[in-house]
Image (cartoon, rainbow, N blue to C red):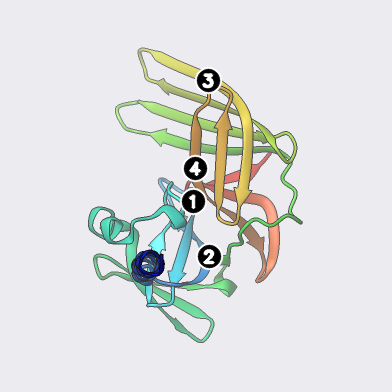
């Protein structure tokens, strides 16, 4: 009996050491932010950024940070990674191509982002619009609307279309279900039994004031109607 107990403790010790070493491979988060970025032709888009304490940064994509395989991502998503440093109140980000850009709260191109907490109430319709002129008189529009009905239920509608000189085509879908938000992760459970986990963050107004008029889902900015 004593030998079996020692054996089990040994297995637990090995498993604990493995988990610890695995966690050590993941850099600690220094903070969440989002930056303003000019788009085509004159639009401004916003991108969530995570700064890590080891001096690296990641432009948040669809996958939640807690689900991210850092080693695999740095290899297959190199364009989303870079390094950062801080000079007084200014943040200098250098992308994977070695190109640097300065961000500053005073210039309104850099803002803190926040995780969800139970004191925050999301209610209403949030919208994401993208698209534009693709040349040869072809225009495309993509519209995604998420309506948070209460603290648990949502509806999600999408409209997309392409319009050209000779023809046009449009498609619309609408779904519903329940959702759960935990920190920087949102889980949508659709009525058709699909489960979708995405990254999540809340925007800010000024330096440290939470502003729920803008949220980030799956790395994309949604603005309340």
Distance from disc 2 to disc 1, alpha carbons, whole Å, reads 14 Å
x, y percentage for residue 35? 49, 62
Q: Which residue is mark 2?
A: 33
Could you tell me which secondary element the residue under label 2 belongs to? strand
Q: Which residue is mark 1?
A: 45
Q: Quadrant of residue 163?
A: top left
Q: Nearer the viewer, residue 112 or 132?
A: 112
Distance from disc 4 to disc 2, alpha carbons, whole Å, reads 20 Å
Q: Which residue is mark 3?
A: 173
Q: Nearer the viewer, residue 62 or 101?
A: 62
Which circle's residue, 4 or 2, is located before the other in the chain? 2
Q: Which residue is mark 4?
A: 197
Q: Nearer the viewer, residue 147 or 177?
A: 177
Q: Is residue 216 above or below residue 166?
A: below
Point 33% across, 63% down: residue: 81
Q: Quadrant of residue 136?
A: top left
């Amino acid at each position: 009996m004593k030998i079996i107990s020692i054996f089990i403790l040994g297995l637990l010790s090995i498993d604990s050491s493995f988990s610890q070493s695995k966690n050590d491979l993941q850099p600690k988060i220094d903070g969440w932010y989002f930056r303003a970025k000019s788009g085509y032709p004159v639009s401004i888009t916003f991108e969530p950024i995570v700064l890590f304490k080891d001096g690296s940064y990641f432009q948040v994509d669809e996958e939640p940070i807690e689900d991210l395989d850092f080693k695999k991502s740095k290899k297959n998503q190199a364009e989303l990674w870079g390094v950062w440093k801080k000079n007084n109140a200014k943040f200098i980000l250098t992308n994977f191509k070695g190109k640097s850009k300065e961000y500053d709260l005073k210039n309104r191109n850099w803002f803190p982002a926040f995780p969800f907490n139970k004191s925050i109430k999301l209610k209403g319709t949030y919208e994401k619009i993208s698209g534009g002129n693709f040349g040869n008189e072809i225009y495309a529009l993509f519209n995604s609307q998420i309506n948070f009905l209460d603290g648990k239920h949502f509806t999600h509608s999408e409209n997309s279309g392409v319009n050209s000189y000779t023809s046009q085509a449009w498609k619309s879908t609408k779904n519903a279900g329940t959702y759960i938000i935990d920190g920087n992760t949102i889980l949508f459970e659709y009525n058709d039994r699909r489960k979708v986990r995405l990254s999540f963050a809340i925007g800010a107004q000024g330096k440290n004031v939470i502003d729920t008029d803008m949220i980030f889902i799956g790395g994309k900015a949604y603005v309340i109607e």
